[in-house]
Image: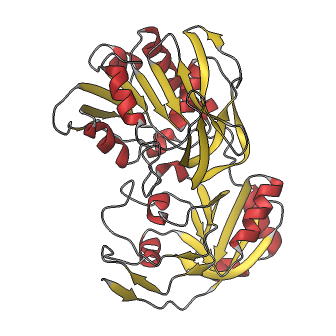
C-alpha cells in the first residue's frame, strides 16, 4: 500500500456567497482568490474525476462528503489533462494518503494547478443554504486576500460572470481532431463532438467497436454530416445550452439525414434544442453519484451520476410532434421529475441527461453505449 503524509501550515481563508453569506476557514490548495458558480457534489468517491471533469469549468465545487483526499491522486483516473474547477471547498482534508494506486496527494495537485480552496468549513450547511436559496456565485479568498474588507470581497463576487448565458464549450474543447481506434472488431465510425468530453467516453465508445473521431466544438456542420462518419455523439460540457447554436445546427443537420445520434448531459440539452424544446436553469442542479433515474419504457430505476445545472423543458406524459417526427421523454429523475432523457421515434437519435460513462461509478446505465451500437447497426 502506498501511504504518504504531508503537513501544510494553513493561512486564513474566507468564502463569501453573493447573498453575503460568509464562512471562515483555512486555505486548502493554492493561496489567492477565485470566483465562480457555487455548486455542491454529493459523491463520497471520485473526487479526482470531479476535479478534472471539464463540465465543472468556472464552478466552485462544495463537497458534501466530510473527508476528502484520503485515496490521493493517480495517473489513471483523471477525466482530462488538468483540473477544471474554479475552486474547491471541503470540510476535513485528509492528512494522509493511503491507496495502492496513489502516486501523489490531492492538495499538492491543487497547489501545483493553482486551484484556490478552503477547508474547515461546514460544507453541509453551505449545501443546505444553496438548496434553499438556489445556485449563486461565490468567492474564495485566502492569505492576504482574505484580509480585505468584506464589502470589497462581496463586490468582487457580484462582479463575476453568471453561468446563465455563458458559452464555454470553446474553452474546454480540443483544438485539433484526434482518433481513438476501435477496440477489437470495428463496426462503424462516430464523430464525437467535444463540448467538454471526458476521457472515459471515447474509451467506452471504442470498446463498442467504434473508431472515435473526437472533433472540436467549432467543426463546420458540413464536415460532420457529409458522410465521412457513420454516426454522431454529442458530449457533456459546461455552460448554458441556450448559447450552443452551432452544436444545435450540427444535430439538426444530422437529424435531417437520419444520422444515428447519441447525446450525454450537455448533449441531451443540445438534442432537445435541435428538436424544438427550450432549456432552463435548475434551481441548484444535479451533481453526484447517487441520483435515481427511471427508464419510462421499462420502469427500471438506475442509480446514476449527474453533473448539470440546466435541463430540457419537454412534456413528460405526451409524445411531442416535432419537425423531425415524434419524440418522447425516455427518462426522468425520480427526485424531482426533471427530464433525464429523450428518444426520437421517427429518427435514430436518443440522449440522456446523466452520465452512463461515470467514473468512479455507478455503472447502472453503462448499457446505453451498447444501445447506441445497436442503433447504428440497424436496431431500435
Q: Is residue 40 visible?
A: yes
Q: Residue at x 40, y 59 (%)?
A: 82
Question: In the figure, is residue 330 to the left or right of 283?
Answer: left
Q: Residue at x 42, y 23 (%)?
A: 261
Decide which of 184, 91 is in the foreground and name it: 184
Decide which of 244, 93 is in the foreground and name it: 93
- The quadrant holding residue 331 is top right
Q: Residue at x 62, y 38 (%)?
A: 240
In percent of width and height, residue 72 lies at: 41, 75
Q: Is residue 31 visible?
A: no
Q: Quadrant of the N terminus?
A: bottom left
Q: Residue placed farthest to the front in the image?
A: 299
Q: Residue at x 61, y 87 (%)?
A: 11
Q: Quadrant of the C terminus?
A: top left
Q: How many marks?
A: 0
Decide which of 332, 119 is in the foreground and name it: 332
In percent of width and height, residue 249 lies at: 50, 19
In percent of width and height, residue 68 lies at: 53, 75
Q: Is residue 354 above or below residue 370?
A: below
Question: In the figure, is residue 167 to the left or right of 5?
Answer: right
Q: Is residue 286 above or below residue 5?
A: above
Q: Residue placed farthest to the left in the image?
A: 184
Question: In the figure, is residue 213 to the left or right of 245?
Answer: left
In percent of width and height, residue 368 lies at: 42, 35
Q: Is residue 36 above or below residue 271?
A: below
Question: In the figure, is residue 374 to the left or right of 19?
Answer: left
- The quadrant holding residue 201 is top left
- The quadrant holding residue 313 is top right
Coloration of the structure image: secondary structure
Amino acid at each position: 500500500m502506498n501511504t504518504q503524509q504531508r503537513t501544510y501550515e494553513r493561512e486564513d481563508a474566507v468564502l463569501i456567497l453573493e447573498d453575503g453569506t460568509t464562512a471562515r476557514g483555512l486555505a486548502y490548495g493554492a493561496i489567492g482568490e477565485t470566483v465562480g458558480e457555487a455548486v455542491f457534489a454529493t459523491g463520497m468517491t471520485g473526487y479526482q474525476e470531479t476535479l478534472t471533469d471539464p463540465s465543472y469549468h468556472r464552478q466552485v465545487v462544495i463537497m458534501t462528503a466530510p473527508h476528502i483526499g484520503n485515496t490521493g491522486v493517480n495517473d489513471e483516473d483523471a477525466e482530462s489533462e488538468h483540473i477544471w474547477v474554479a475552486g474547491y471547498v471541503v470540510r476535513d482534508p485528509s492528512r494522509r494518503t493511503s491507496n495502492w494506486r496513489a502516486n501523489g496527494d490531492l492538495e499538492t495537485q491543487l497547489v501545483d494547478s493553482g486551484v484556490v480552496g478552503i477547508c474547515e468549513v461546514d460544507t453541509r450547511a453551505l449545501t443546505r443554504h444553496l438548496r434553499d436559496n438556489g445556485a449563486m456565485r461565490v468567492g474564495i479568498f485566502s492569505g492576504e486576500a482574505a484580509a480585505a474588507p468584506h464589502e470589497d470581497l462581496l463586490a468582487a463576487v457580484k462582479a463575476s460572470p453568471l453561468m446563465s448565458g455563458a458559452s464555454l464549450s470553446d474553452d474546454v474543447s480540443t483544438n485539433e481532431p484526434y482518433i481513438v481506434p476501435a477496440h477489437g472488431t470495428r463496426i462503424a465510425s462516430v464523430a464525437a463532438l467535444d463540448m467538454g468530453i471526458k476521457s472515459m467516453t471515447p474509451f467506452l465508445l471504442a470498446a463498442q467497436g467504434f473508431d472515435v473521431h473526437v472533433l472540436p466544438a467549432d467543426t463546420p456542420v458540413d464536415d460532420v454530416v457529409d458522410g465521412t462518419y457513420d454516426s454522431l455523439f454529442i458530449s457533456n460540457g459546461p455552460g448554458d445550452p441556450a448559447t450552443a447554436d452551432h452544436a444545435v445546427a450540427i444535430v439538426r443537420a444530422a437529424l435531417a439525414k437520419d444520422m444515428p445520434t447519441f447525446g450525454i448531459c450537455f448533449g441531451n440539452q443540445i438534442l432537445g434544442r435541435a428538436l424544438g424544446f427550450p432549456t432552463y436553469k435548475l434551481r441548484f442542479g444535479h451533481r453526484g453519484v447517487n441520483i435515481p433515474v427511471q427508464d419510462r419504457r421499462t420502469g427500471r430505476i438506475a442509480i446514476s451520476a449527474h453533473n448539470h445545472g440546466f435541463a430540457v423543458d419537454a412534456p413528460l406524459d405526451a409524445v411531442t410532434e416535432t419537425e423531425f417526427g415524434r419524440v418522447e421523454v425516455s427518462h426522468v429523475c425520480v427526485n424531482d421529475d426533471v427530464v433525464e432523457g429523450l428518444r426520437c421515434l421517427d429518427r435514430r437519435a436518443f440522449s440522456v441527461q446523466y452520465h452512463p460513462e461515470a467514473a468512479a461509478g455507478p455503472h447502472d446505465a453503462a448499457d446505453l453505449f451498447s444501445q447506441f451500437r445497436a442503433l447504428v447497426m440497424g436496431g431500435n
